[in-house]
């Protein structure tokens, strides 16, 4: 059975796109933050409070570097997290 440990979502504010990462286990936030910071297209990763009652209390906000699209960064995040949670 494949348990879904994370979800991603592309969002936009002031014309700038970024990727939200929702982890099933919030205790993984700091480890995953360090992992995602190593990805090529990632400029920065913030642990941010969620304002939605439907989401975990803390989420990750991933900002892509200027030369990468949010879609490219989202794909590399999904690949990295799939590998991380399957090990």
Image: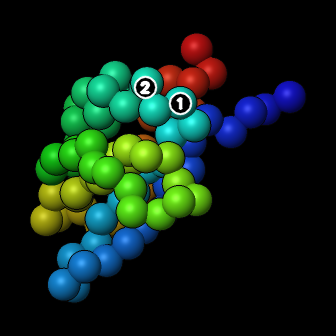
Nearest the viewer among 14 and 49 is 49
Q: Position of residue 48 (x, y in %)?
A: 28, 49
Q: Quadrant of residue 24?
A: top right
Q: In the picture, which quadrant includes the C terminus?
A: top right
**How far apart, in angstroms, are the residues tagged by discs 1 and 2?**
6 Å
From where the camera sits, is residue 34 visible?
yes
Instruction: Tell me the tag on residue 25.
Output: 1
Q: How many marks?
A: 2
Q: Residue at x 22, y 36 (%)?
A: 37
Q: Is residue 19 above or below residue 33?
A: below
> Residue 6 sits in which quadrant?
top right
Q: Dot 1: within a 10 Å radius of its alpha carbon, few (fewer than 14), some, or many (20 or more) residues?
A: few
Query: Dot 2, crowdedness within 10 Å: few (<14), some or many (≥20)?
Result: few
Farthest top residue in view: 87
Against 57, residue 54 (above or below) is below
What is the x, y in percent for residue 76? 41, 46
Q: Is residue 83 visible?
A: no
Q: Position of residue 27 (x, y in %)?
A: 43, 24
Whether the residues at callouts 1 and 2 have beta carbons within 8 Å, the answer is yes
The quadrant of the picture occupied by the N terminus is top right
Query: Secondary structure under badge 1?
Result: loop
Is 16 displayed left or right of 25 in the figure? left
Q: Position of residue 34 (x, y in %)?
A: 25, 27
Q: Residue at x 42, y 67 (%)?
A: 10
* Residue sitting farthest toward the right: 1
Query: Is residue 32 placed above or below 78 in the rendered structure?
Result: above
Q: How is the image coloured?
A: rainbow
- The residue that mark 2 highlights is 28
Image position of 44 (left or right of 61): left
Name the residue furthest bottom: 15
The one nearer the camera, 39 or 57, is: 57
């Amino acid at each position: 059975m494949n348990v879904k440990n994370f979800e991603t979502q592309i969002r936009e504010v002031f014309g700038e796109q970024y990727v939200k990462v929702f982890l099933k286990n919030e205790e993984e936030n700091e480890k995953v933050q360090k992992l995602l910071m190593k990805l090529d297209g990632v400029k920065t990763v913030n642990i941010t409070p969620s304002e939605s009652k439907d989401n975990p209390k803390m989420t990750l906000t991933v900002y892509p570097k200027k030369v990468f699209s949010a879609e490219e960064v989202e794909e590399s995040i999904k690949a990295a997290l799939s590998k991380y949670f399957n090990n």
